[in-house]
Amino acid sequence: MFMKNWQLLSKEESEKVWDIIHDKFKFNPSINKRAKSFKIEQNHVIYDISHIWKKSSFDSLCKDLEDKMLEVFKFITHNYEEIYALNWQHESYKFNPRGEMPRDEFGEWLVPILPDGDYYFFIEKDFEWGYIGHPWQKTITIFGDELIEGIKLNKPCMLDRIGKEVTNTLKI
């Protein structure tokens, strides 16, 4: 049922995409909270989301993140454009943000948007912009001018704290 919009990447496509992630972003996953797990050369903003787990509004903040990021993805993609939804060491997909957004048994997207245990990547197919959730540093990194600008227009509430490590020539 949900596979109409969310298409599981074949083993070959998944390996190819992860090879690009490792090469382009120097992706080096680590459970060390201080380790540099990836390097973004493009304009990017790192948001600290460590504060949200302590809030009584956690569920509404998560829903707001899902809703607003989906709207931003729709805003910056074409009608039939698909983006990657990658879950490190798990199945990964491509999907159209305008299509059906099914939920798993935990009520989350097939690749959750909130980094709560794994690295999650939502990336344009040419790797020009993307969203990377870091589970142990409790950060969300947004890169690429289009996505940064889109978020400025419809910023999720939990993205209210900018982390210490920001490389961005744009005003946010």
Image (tube, helix red, strand yellow):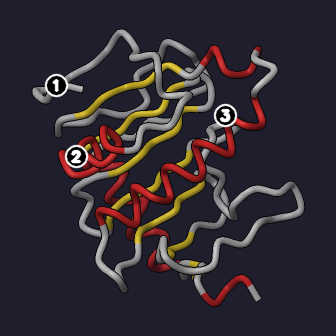
Q: Indicate the position of residue 77 as horizontal and vertical percent values.
A: 31, 70
Closest to the observer: 19 or 93?
93
In this figure, which residue is indicated by the disc labeled 1? 171
Residue density around tag 3, few if under 14, some if 14–19, many if 20 or more, within 10 Å:
some
Please name the residue shown 49% across and 76% down the image. Answer: 98
Q: Indicate the position of residue 4 as horizontal and vertical percent values.
A: 63, 90
Cα separation between marks 1 and 3: 24 Å
In this figure, which residue is indicated by the disc labeled 3? 61
Type of amino acid under label 1: Lys
Instruction: Locate the C terminus by quadrant.
Output: top left
From the image, state whether disc 1 or disc 2 is nearer to you: 1
Type of amino acid under label 2: Gly
170 displayed left or right of 36: left
Can you tell which mark lies on residue 153? none
For the residues bearing labels 1 and 2, Cβ distance under 8 angstroms: no
Instruction: Locate the N terminus by quadrant.
Output: bottom right
Q: Earlier in the sequence, mark 1 or mark 2?
A: 2
In this figure, which residue is indicated by the disc labeled 2? 144
From the image, state whether disc 3 or disc 2 is nearer to you: 3
Q: Earlier in the sequence, mark 1 or mark 3?
A: 3
Cα separation between marks 3 and 2: 24 Å
Cα separation between marks 1 and 2: 13 Å
Q: Indicate the quadrant where residue 45 lies.
A: top left
Question: SS class of the residue under badge 2?
Answer: loop
Above or below 60: residue 74? below
Residue density around tag 1, few if under 14, some if 14–19, many if 20 or more, within 10 Å:
few
Q: Indicate the position of residue 56 as horizontal and vertical percent values.
A: 81, 20
